[in-house]
Image (tube, rainbow, N blue to C red):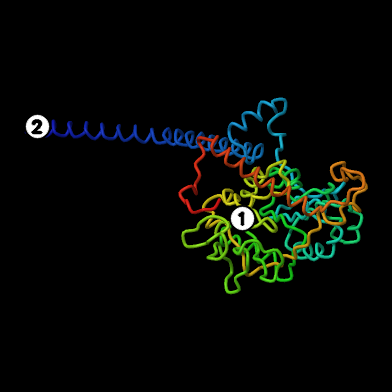
Amino acid sequence: MKAFKSWRWQLRKRIMLFDGGTCGIKMKQLPFMGIICTVMLFIVYRTTKYQYQHTEMESKLLPFGTEKDFQEASIKLGGLPRGIIQARSDLELRPLWLSHSLRSKVAFSSHRNLLAIPVGIKQKRNVNSIVQKFLPVNFTIILFHYDGNVDGWWDLEWSKKAIHIVAMNQTKWWFAKRFLHPDVVSIYDYIFLWDEDLGVANFHPGRYLKIVKSERLEISQPALDPNSTDIHHRITIRKRTKRLHRRVYDLKGSTKCTNASDGPPCAGFVEGMAPVFSRSAWHCAWHLIQNDLVHGWGMDMKLGYCAQGDRTRKVGIVDSEFIVHQGIQTLGGHSIRKASRYISPEESPRRHGAGPRDVRSEIRRQSTSELLIFKERWEKAVKADKEWVDPYKRNPKSRY
């Protein structure tokens, strides 16, 4: 009996020793497992950080480019270390030297917007009124001088802080295509590409942008006062009881706008006199501008394709902040010969003793011709691009 109890005791002791040994082994493994987990976490952290830095580098090199664009650019820029490459620029003036106080101001990064206007000296007073509205709301100003007169603007205090670009008798779209490349204006949240003959007594850019952001509009324009001159499309007319609208219903005229109409000029439409683009929308719109078609006719009907989504939601007219279109035709007007000492052979009469040309008629004829060319190019591009799918093709009643 004692032998049996002794045997049981020995067996229990061995089990206890075995369990204790196992537990000891497990206890010894814990620090080792902790080291393994720490190493793995470090590897994950370093990999994630590398991927983030790589993405940041690519965004700096090509903020709007594709991987294919990046590879092509890498070949061309192979002689430079990647960290030194800057693919972006801006239109901000830089001082020739910096004091300590100025250095902190220059380094400060904030949301900025851009106002670009083609101007002639005859509209100086009205342009001044426009600019005075925008300056307090952190806008950079760029003036495109189509009449060659820059000296006449220096008496305005803000003029010395603006960007001035001069090219004789060129249009807004000519200037925009050449000087507002997306990589140059990428720091600006919104680009206002306005005409010079707009009345802004009832417009505030700060309140306007607040509405645009809250409604997530990528392309927009302020509504036109019903008393404006040269109202071409009913959708742009201000609705007194609304903050904004995105479509219009109109059964008059050649274009009928009904519930079934979801394309321009009934919906998803702004006119070329006062468009406002988000950064992403402008990147698309800039590529839509044809380099040789300087009047831009027909382009407004296609801007909805640049709305970064559904044009019936992303494009709108802001009613609470409205403007007056004065309809003053200055570019190519009677002052065109006085403003320029050089008259090209095309501008001069072909026959000796011939009377002066009707410049406005010539411009309208050219604009109409460009409209036809633009439509032909669009149709040709659609047929040629087999991979492109028209998101609005399902609407057979759309005029464009």
Q: Position of residue 199 (x, y in %)?
A: 75, 67
Q: Indicate the quadrant where residue 246 lies.
A: bottom right
**Residue placed under numbered mark 1 in the picture:** 219
Seen at 55% across and 39% down, the residue is: 382
Quadrant housing the N terminus: top left
Seen at 86% across and 57% down, the residue is: 334
Q: Secondary structure at mark 1?
A: strand
Q: Position of residue 23 (x, y in %)?
A: 31, 35
Q: Amino acid at mark 2?
A: Phe
Asked whether, in this view, residue 263 is left or right of residue 272, the answer is left
**Residue placed under numbered mark 2 in the picture:** 4
Q: Residues within 10 Å of mark 1 (few under 14, many from 20)?
A: many
Q: Nearer the viewer, residue 139 or 383?
A: 383
Compared with residue 25, is residue 245 higher up or lower down, i.e. above or below?
A: below
The residue mark sitting in front, 2 or 1, is 1
Q: Amino acid at mark 1?
A: Ile
